[in-house]
Amino acid sequence: MLLSTVPMRRFGVRVLLVILLGIFTGALFGQKMAGKQDFTADELAVNASSLYAQGKYSEAAALYQRFLADFGSAAEAQAMILQMRFPHAMCLLRLQRMSEAQQVIKEALVSESADPAQRQEMLFWSGVCQMQENQYAQAGITFEKFVGLFPSGSDRNPGYARQFPAVQKVSEARLLIGACLLLEGKSKDAAGYFARIKNELIPTNRGRATVLQLHALLDAGEEDEAIKVVIEEFPRMEDWCNWSRFRR
């Protein structure tokens, strides 16, 4: 999983959000590229794919961009470009070039013929990019759309997860929906949202949802409700909470 820290501007603290943060086909083209190296379009695509597979994301991204610049308008290249969108976007995400990644993802999602598993993955990361661009309301909508792609309980089905790996990000996406509410300043809505979903999440994300719920309650001035949540989640802290009330 990728780690990302999202600044909570309405809080005095930073909320850590765990975000969860090529195959090429087509006809060979006889035309040559102008430039320092003399590659056909097919050779350029294969080289970009190889670099991506080796984890050389900066070099791969440069070749994907070069391909688009030189062959993007060629009718014969469109099928190959469609297949390039996913690895190109993943390179840019790895490089934290979120605005560029968002543009590539947007172009990829326009086509209904893209690989379904890759479309799911890119939709999730579209939401992440929108959060990074401070588009919190739109990001929340995107994550809702992502979660809605999957049947209930499919994230706990190993066979389904092998076919559609992005389903494993559903729990993460549900956390981020609430985080978007927090970042919009809708603290009470966020607290209610986390209270509704946390028991449906895997244990790790349930704990994160509880922490975010507490932040939301405190930001909304609901200190007594926050104490109730602490007691429910950590019964042994009840004596401490009673002492805290006494001290006020």
Image (tube, grey):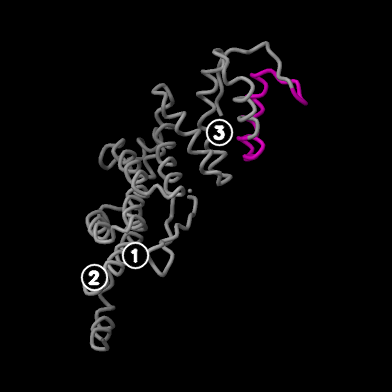
Which segment is the magenta one?
A: 35-61
Q: Residue furthest bottom?
A: 247
Residue contact at pointers 2 and 1, CB within 8 angstroms = no
**145 or 68, which is in the foreground?**
68
Q: Residue furthest right?
A: 36
**Badge 3 is on which residue?**
88
Tell me the amino acid under the disc marked 3: His
Give the structural element (helix, strand or loop) at label 2: loop
**243 or 144, which is in the foreground?**
144
Which residue is at 50% across, 23% downward? 82
Q: Quadrant of the C terminus?
A: bottom left
Looking at the image, tell me whether mark 3 or mark 1 is earlier in sequence order: 3
Mark 3 closeness class: few <14, some 14–19, many ≥20 residues within 10 Å: many
Which residue is at 71% across, 19% downward? 33
**Badge 1 is on which residue?**
211
**67 or 117, which is in the foreground?**
67
- Residue 203 placed where, x, y %? 33, 58
